[in-house]
Amino acid sequence: MNLENTQVQMRKGILEYCILHIIARGEVYASDMLDELTAAKMIVVEGTLYPLLTRLKNAGLLEYKWVESKSGPPRKYYTLTEEGTKFLNGLTETWEDLVHSTQMIKTKSTS
């Protein structure tokens, strides 16, 4: 079994959750999301981020608006919809349950 492949799959599994958290802070430009995710070692390619953003938008979880830029073409800024906020809250509950369960398993001593 390949450790690196498993690590990549684990990151992909929580990528949507991380993206929603970043957007929940307020309007965000995709390039800034990409920088933050890359710095956190969650994602390194645009080809992963943009299709995921499109899927989340099509699901009604986020929306975007175009903002004119002084230094180039207009920029697309993303925000969560009300449905997106509810979805993120549900994911947060699930995440907290998973962390708790994982910690229980990791710290259980053998008797």
Image: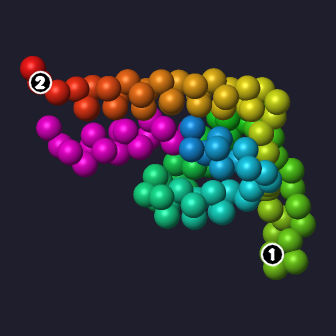
Residue type of the residue flagged with mark 1: Gly
Which x, y percent locates residue 13? 44, 35
Which residue corresponds to mark 2?
110
Which x, y percent locates residue 49? 57, 49
Question: Foreground: 108 or 54?
Answer: 108
In the drawing, does residue 76 fall left or right of residue 41? right
Q: Magenta stretch containing residue 13, yes or no? A: yes
In the drawing, does residue 1 fall left or right of residue 107? left
Please tell me which of labels 2 and 1 falls first in the chain: 1
Q: Quadrant of the N terminus?
A: top left
Circles 2 and 1: CB atoms closer than 8 Å: no
Q: Residue furthest top?
A: 111
Q: How is the image coloured?
A: rainbow
In the drawing, does residue 90 fall left or right of residue 81? left
User: Residue at horizontal 51%, vertical 30%?
Assistant: 95
Magenta-highlighted stretch: main secondary structure? Answer: helix
Q: Quadrant of residue 103?
A: top left
Q: Which mark is residue 63?
A: none
Which x, y percent locates residue 23? 71, 47
Which residue corresponds to mark 1?
72
Count residues near mark 2 (Cα–Cα under 10 Å), then give few for <14, some for 14-19, many for 20+: few
Residue 91, compared with residue 40, is above or below; it is above
Q: Tell how many labels.
A: 2
Question: Foreground: 6 or 107?
Answer: 107
Q: Specify the segment rendered in magenta.
A: 1-16
Residue type of the residue flagged with mark 2: Thr
In the drawing, does residue 105 fall left or right of residue 52? left
User: Residue at horizontal 67%, vertical 28%?
Assistant: 89
Q: Magenta stretch containing residue 92, yes or no? A: no
Of marks 2 and 1, the one in the foreground: 2
Count residues near mark 1 (Cα–Cα under 10 Å), then give few for <14, some for 14-19, many for 20+: few
